[in-house]
Amino acid sequence: SQKIEQNSEALNIQEGKTATLTCNYTNYSPAYLQWYRQDPGRGPVFLLLIRENEKEKRKERLKVTFDTTLKQSLFHITASQPADSATYLCALDNGGSQGNLIFGKGTKLSVKP
Amino acid sequence: GAGVSQSPSNKVTEKGKDVELRCDPISGHTALYWYRQSLGQGLEFLIYFQGNSAPDKSGLPSDRFSAERTGGSVSTLTIQRTQQEDSAVYLCASSPGTFYTGELFFGEGSRLTVL
C-alpha cells in the first residue's frame, strides 16, 4: 500500500527565510498530490494541488514541486512570516481506495521573528 | 451551509458509553469523509460516503464503529462502548464527488475524550 513520509516532524526557521518541507511516497506515483495547512484545534485547509504531469505549481508565496522519479514533493514558503507557523500536511491520491486521499503526519513549521 | 459543520465540538464521556458525532457537509457535496486524528498523528481514514452509500468501510477500527448518512447530507459516526484509545479528534470533510480531484473541505472536528 502507499506510504507517505514527511521527513521532519518540526522545522524552525527565521522570519524572511524560505521554508522547505518534504513529502516522500514509497509506492506507485499518485495522479495528484495536495498540501494542506492545519492550525492547532482547527481542521486542515487546502493550499495547493499538483498533478503528476506538472513539475511545479505556485500560489503567491507558496511553491510546490513534484518529482515522480524521486517520488517526492517539495513545498516552499518564501519570505516566511510568523503567521505561516502551522502544521503542513501532504496528501496523495490513493488510487481510488479509501476515499482517494491518504495523509502524511505533517511537519510543524515555526517561524521566529 | 457555508462550510462543513461538526457537532459536538468537544465530548467527554466515560469508558463504555456510546457516543454520536455529527457532520453536516457543504450543501451539494455528494462525497463525505470521516478521519481520525490522534495526538501527534496524521489523519487516519475511517470511512467515506458517496451519496448515502459507503463503498469503503475498511478504515473503521473495529465493529464498535459505525457510520451512516441519510438524504445524501448529514452523517453520523457512532462509537459504541467507548474505550480510552478512542480519544482523538474526529474530522469530517466533504467534496463535490469522489471522482473530484480537488480539495477536501474539512470541518473543525469533534474532540472526543474517553475517561
Image (cartoon, grey):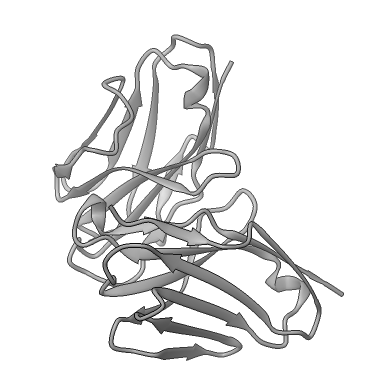
Q: Position of residue A80 (x, y in %)?
A: 72, 81
Front residue (pair B45, A44)? B45
Q: Position of residue A31 (x, y in %)?
A: 25, 74
- B23 vs B16: above or below: below
Front residue (pair A41, A87)? A87
- Quarter the C terminus of chain A occupies: bottom right
Q: Position of residue B66 (x, y in %)?
A: 26, 28
Front residue (pair A86, A22)? A22
- A102 vs B47: above or below: below
**Residue B26 in view in this figure:** no
Q: Position of residue A90 (x, y in %)?
A: 46, 65
Q: Residue at x 29, y 33 (%)?
A: B60
Q: Residue at x 30, y 34 (%)?
A: B76
Q: Is residue A33 left or right of residue A19?
A: left
Q: Is residue B36 left or right of residue B50?
A: right
Counting the numbered discs, the total is 0
- A39 vs A112: above or below: above
Q: Residue at x 35, y 17 (%)?
A: B80
Q: Residue at x 18, y 59 (%)?
A: A96
Q: Is residue B6 left or right of residue A10?
A: left
**Residue A11 in view in this figure:** yes
Q: Report which quarter residue B6 is drawn in.
A: top left
Q: Residue furthest top?
A: B16
Q: Residue furthest right?
A: A113
Front residue (pair A54, B2)? A54
Q: Is residue A102 left or right of residue B113?
A: left
